[in-house]
Image: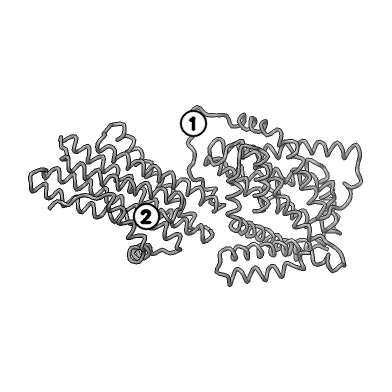
Amino acid sequence: MFDIFDVLALIGGLCLFLFGMNIMGDGLERRAGNSLKALLGKLTGNKFTGFLTGMGVTAVIQSSSATTVMVVGFVNSKLMTLKQSIGVIMGANIGTTITAWILSLGGIASDNVFMKLLKPTSFTPVLALIGIAYTMFSKSSKRKDTGTILLGFATLMFGMDAMSDAVSGLANVPEFRNLFLAFENPILGVLVGAVVTAIIQSSSASVGILQALSATGAVTYGAAIPIVMGQGIGTCVTALLSSIGTTKNAKRAALVHLSFNVIGTVLWLSVFSVLSHIFEPMILNESASYLGIAVCHTGFKALCALVLLPASELLEKLAYKLVPEGKTPEKAVELDERLLATPPIAVEQSCRLAAKMAAEAVEGFRLSIEAVENYSAETVKKIRKIEGDTDHYEDVLGTFLAKLGKSQISDEDGITVTKLLKAIGDFERISDHAVNVIESIEEMREKGIQFSPIAKQELDVLCRAVDETLVMTESAFVGDDLSIAYNVEPLEQVIDNLKDLLRNNHIHRLKEGACTVETGFIWSDLLTNLERVSDHCSNIAAGIIDAKAHTMNSHEVINNFKKDSPLFAEKYEEYAEKYSISQRS
């Protein structure tokens, strides 16, 4: 007998199941962050490598939908080509089947003690206890993530068990049995599988629900196999929705996912229909088990990959037919918000864009230094473009990093986000100072002003010192090199002293009539801009040192370094000698 209380129990079990799957997936993504970076970093144009990568990543995060959405984001950001994405998408379809194998443990029925221990109801209470202990009492983010995974798994299995118990009463309901007899119509079975999966947007969850329903004994293999085939099509909805508003290649990646599942389903559903009508195998009328559904799920996905992986070029051509090239080239999205779903990858891409911003800012200021002696309209145009680009990078990175900081990220990634947020403002200001230098040079040209030979020599020394600190800062930032970062502060101190010395020397020249007051204003502006660039370099280096020391008090770290470190005194003397200028008396 199936009554309203069974319906409520079924709804509760389903909610627990979906919630557990969701939080377990989130925990796995965070816990496996560095593994995801390593796996995706090994991607090549080889479709088989991509296939294995997709399978591995999805087996880790337990969601082909999440992997495919991630791939759409990668293609949209030009982290991955469409060709690379095809193998990854196919691999993801097989990687997701591992969930069904884990859930199949719930179908173990034996009086043997060792077999009983394999049943989730036997060991999930222990996992839940460990999970809650890690989550509530551990300070380590990794242990907290491990606790989330264990709690998610325990919740998922309790939900699965609750669903199985709730539907057990349906075994004697004729209408329920007739419903699944109707699903033995292959086309109807595929439609049901596709629709249910599209609604809950997870083929793993959909297969789990089918496994729970199989506990009634009413689900035959003849009905289960078409439903499993349809689930692959339904899971494409997530990627298709994610591709809205993306580049053409990202849309093509989502369509590759859809075409892979549709073509595979049409092909193997045709084979299934022919074989079932000609040979009428008895197994199709038998009740499906948890394990049997897992086998069907994996077998179907593997057969699809077996046929379509060698034909991946055809899927690529089909995607180009469905989404043809436009007349104007598209601009790639630097930071796709879809990457926020996988924080470790989002952090990695943020670092890449910040490195690009750093390179442009440093190049812009070095060009402005060169323009002091070798001015050209082309150089000025390039510097102004760089300043506009770094403004754009600061806006994009600042917005993205702020959103990333609000998500659940590891302590290590949190430190990196803080370091990037500190640095991008300094790099943007460096490019602003490059424009300021150009404006001073242009003013000199308009007014026909020139520095005296001795002033030019002094300015050259200061420019070389600033150039060196710029190069060191970029190298320390991009390479996250602590040893180079420590060398920035001694040189910054030398530059501060140089600025004061050059300003005093100019006053002496002014008294002697060797320079004019008007020249002095431009001289002062140039010195100020050069010195402030070294200050920004010092801030960036301090941020790197902060990140390594896991502290937010950069002033204290730097002050202690100046006071107590023999290295600071040694490097200061080295740079002071290298960039020495005689003081005018």
Please rate how many residues cluster around mark 1, counting C-alpha atoms within 10 Å: few if below 14, some from 14 to 19, many from 20.
few
Q: Looking at the rendering, which quadrant does residue 374 occupy?
A: top left
- On screen, 165 above or below 439? below
Mark 2: amino acid: Asn
Q: Nearer the viewer, residue 270 or 49?
A: 49
Please rate how many residues cluster around mark 2, counting C-alpha atoms within 10 Å: few if below 14, some from 14 to 19, many from 20.
many
Q: Residue at x 74, y 55 (%)?
A: 208
Q: Comparing marks 1 and 2, which lies closer to the viewer?
A: 2
Mark 1: amino acid: Pro
Which residue corresponds to mark 2?
Answer: 487
- Across and down, in percent, residue 139 comes to 55, 69
Q: Give the structural element (helix, strand or loop) at label 2.
A: helix
> In this figure, what is the number of numbered marks?
2
Q: Residue at x 32, y 43 (%)?
A: 365
Q: Give the structural element (helix, strand or loop) at label 1.
A: loop
Q: Is residue 239 left or right of residue 336?
A: right
Q: Is residue 222 left or right of residue 58?
A: right
**Label disc, if present, on residue 329 of the rendered structure:** 1
| Distance from Cα at disc 1 to Cα at disc 2 | 44 Å
Q: Is residue 96 visible?
A: yes
- Across and down, in percent, residue 475 comes to 42, 48
Q: Looking at the rendering, which quadrant does residue 270 occupy?
A: top right
